[in-house]
């Protein structure tokens, strides 16, 4: 019964915010495309510098010179939690609306640039490396960021309506609680993604890099 209630709540949330979800998904995809285009616009010297740093990193990985998994988990989770937390705070204010969309777009740019650069410089090997080091956690992170951005935009729009349309007397506090609970659920997803990035990705990267040699 409880499971059906949660499923129904998710279905209602998606239905209510379908236009915002479509917009945020398209915006994120535009960020990925832009990030991939930026790779091609880099000068040869910039590409060589980045590739040199990349080779140094891969050399350290192949020798097992990784930070402790627990430290990597803490750093990754703190980074993602700050990003989501900032979106949550921006959703509480009327003026934060455009910044939320910019943050989501920039996240897409980072993903597009990272994967695009690896594939551009290393071909199939780069694709394999991006598949084991970038994509797995992003299968969780990307939906988490899109859900957060959508919820933040939706709540910000409700704040605007309550502020400027006096006919709308729907109480804000229950909406705030639902919004905050959703962000806490996203936090659990961030923890799973961070754990994969810290404990699993290094092992997979080492396997791919050793197969290169």
Image (cartoon, helix red, strand yellow):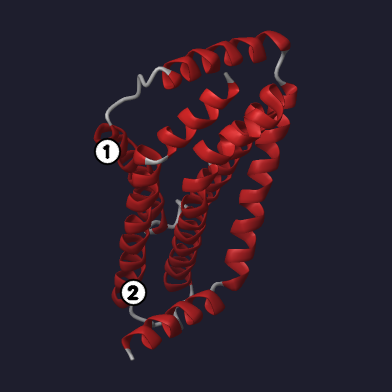
Nearer to us: label 2 or label 1: 1
Query: How far apart, in angstroms, are the residues tagged by discs 2 and 1?
Result: 34 Å
Q: Are marks 2 and 1 in contact (CB under 8 Å)?
A: no
Which numbered circle lies on residue 172?
Answer: 2
Furthest-bottom residue in this view: 1
Q: Assign the C terminus to one quadrant of the image.
A: top right
Q: Is residue 9 left or right of residue 104?
A: left
Q: Which residue is mark 1?
A: 74
SS for dot 2: helix
- Height in image: 73 above or below 171? above
**Residue sitting at x 36%, y 84%:** 3
- The reply to whether residue 111 is in sight is yes
Within-10-Å neighbours for mark 2: few <14, some 14–19, many 20+ = few
Q: Is residue 100 left or right of residue 73?
A: right
> Measured from the top left, where is residue 169 in percent x and y?
39, 82
> Measured from the top left, where is residue 150 in percent x and y?
50, 62
**Residue sitting at x 67%, y 8%:** 45
Q: Which is more toward the observer, 170 or 18?
A: 18
């Amino acid at each position: 019964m409880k499971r059906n209630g949660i499923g129904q709540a998710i279905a209602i949330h998606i239905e209510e915010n379908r236009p915002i979800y479509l917009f945020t998904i398209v915006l994120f995809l535009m960020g990925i495309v832009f990030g991939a285009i930026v790779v091609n616009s880099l000068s040869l010297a910039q590409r060589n510098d980045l590739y040199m740093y990349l080779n140094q990193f891969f050399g350290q990985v192949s020798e097992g010179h990784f930070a402790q998994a627990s430290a990597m988990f803490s750093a990754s989770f703190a980074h993602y939690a700050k990003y989501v937390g900032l979106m949550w705070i921006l959703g509480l204010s009327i003026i934060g609306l455009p910044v939320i969309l910019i943050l989501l777009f920039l996240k897409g740019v980072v993903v597009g640039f990272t994967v695009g650069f690896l594939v551009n410089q290393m071909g199939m090997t780069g694709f394999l490396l991006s598949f084991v080091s970038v994509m797995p956690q992003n299968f969780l992170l990307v939906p988490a960021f899109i859900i957060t951005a959508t919820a933040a935009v939706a709540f910000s729009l409700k704040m605007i309506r309550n502020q400027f349309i006096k006919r709308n007397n729907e109480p804000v506090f229950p909406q705030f609680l639902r919004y905050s609970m959703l962000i806490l659920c996203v936090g659990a997803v961030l923890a799973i993604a961070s754990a994969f990035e810290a404990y699993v990705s290094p092992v997979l990267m080492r396997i791919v890099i050793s197969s290169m040699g």
